[in-house]
Amino acid sequence: MSDSSYTPPKVWTWEPGNGGRFANINRPIAGPTHDKPLPVGKHPLQLHSLATPNGVKVTIMLEELLAAGIAGAEYDAWLINIMEGDQFGSGFVEANPNSKIPALMDHSVTPPQRVFESGSILMYLAEKFNAFIPDTPAGRTECFNWLFWQMGSAPILGGGFGHFYAYAPEKFEYPINRYTMEVKRQLDVLDRHLADNTYLCGDTYSIADMAVWPWYGWLVQNKVYEAAEFLEADGYTHVLRWANAIAERPAVKRGVKVNRTWGEPDEQLPERHDASDLD
């Protein structure tokens, strides 16, 4: 093992700006840093987000609902620039005390309902509109199995592999090897399951697919961390088949653009307030 040895102190001390891409916004305390109420647009559903994998889950869901003819799913999407600390504004912290995107406010109910954590938002919308969730006990359970699999697995991919492989100020062998091994195991879990299933819940496209695809679909398509070659992603043929099929869905193509501020100009839509904004 080539990493230099580190002996933790008896009491950890925070050193602001301690390196890494997100050092300027990381801190060990919660709560707002400034007063900034959230804007409210014309639709009952108000999304405050950014087009990261977690944010894209929700915009895909909303666009899929609209594509299915569910008019009540119309929404405003407001940009939360996490690199500028928008997530620490007082209004956003009221919507999500954990200060992570995405956060949803549903103004169709009184008082308005806050919904935070991407998995919770997907479940809330699926149950609110009775869509993209199986209607049998066995089907719902399988859907939730994979939804919560993603909630538990993605921190290994993002906070573990993604951080040490792509974002850490220095490359260290031990954490990269440790998290690479686990991410490849996770991809193998998906690949074995998708060998016998069109989608994660069999033949039914669901919120489980919407949750897993922006992380693991983008990973094998080389759209996060630029690590597809390193991970030998082309060997996970069933994951690639599934990822490519979902990427071709019209609602997915629309959803991935919302709250996006990077890439080609036609791939970006920082805010979305009407369906025509995406046309």
Image (cartoon, grey):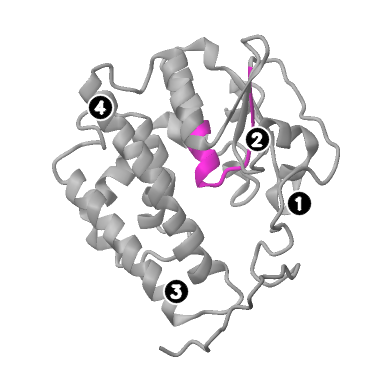
**Residue 60 sits inside the magenta stretch:** no
Marks 3/2: CA distance? 30 Å
Magenta range is 45-59
Q: Position of residue 123 (x, y in %)?
A: 44, 26
Q: Position of residue 81 (x, y in %)?
A: 71, 46
Q: Which mark is residue 175?
A: 3
The residue to which callout 1 is attached is: 84
Which numbered disc, 2 or 1, marks the residue closer to the eye? 2
Would residue 66 be seen by someone viewing this image from the given angle? yes
Q: Earlier in the sequence, mark 2 or mark 1?
A: 1
Q: Residues within 10 Å of mark 4 (few under 14, many from 20)?
A: some
Q: Residue at x 38, y 55 (%)?
A: 221
Q: Amino acid at mark 4?
A: Thr
Marks 3/4: CA distance? 37 Å
Kindly indicate whether the residue at mark 1 contacts the one at mark 3 (C-beta within 8 angstroms).
no
Question: Which residue extends farthest front?
Answer: 10
Q: Quadrant of the C terminus?
A: top right
On the image, which quarter does residue 277 sit in?
top right
Q: Say whether residue 33 is left or right of residue 241.
A: right
Q: Residue at x 52, y 11 (%)?
A: 71
Q: Amino acid at mark 1?
A: Glu
Marks 3/1: CA distance? 28 Å
Q: Nearer the viewer, residue 97 or 10?
A: 10
Marks 4/2: CA distance? 31 Å
Q: Earlier in the sequence, mark 3 or mark 4?
A: 3
**Residue 48 sits inside the magenta stretch:** yes
The residue to which callout 4 is attached is: 204
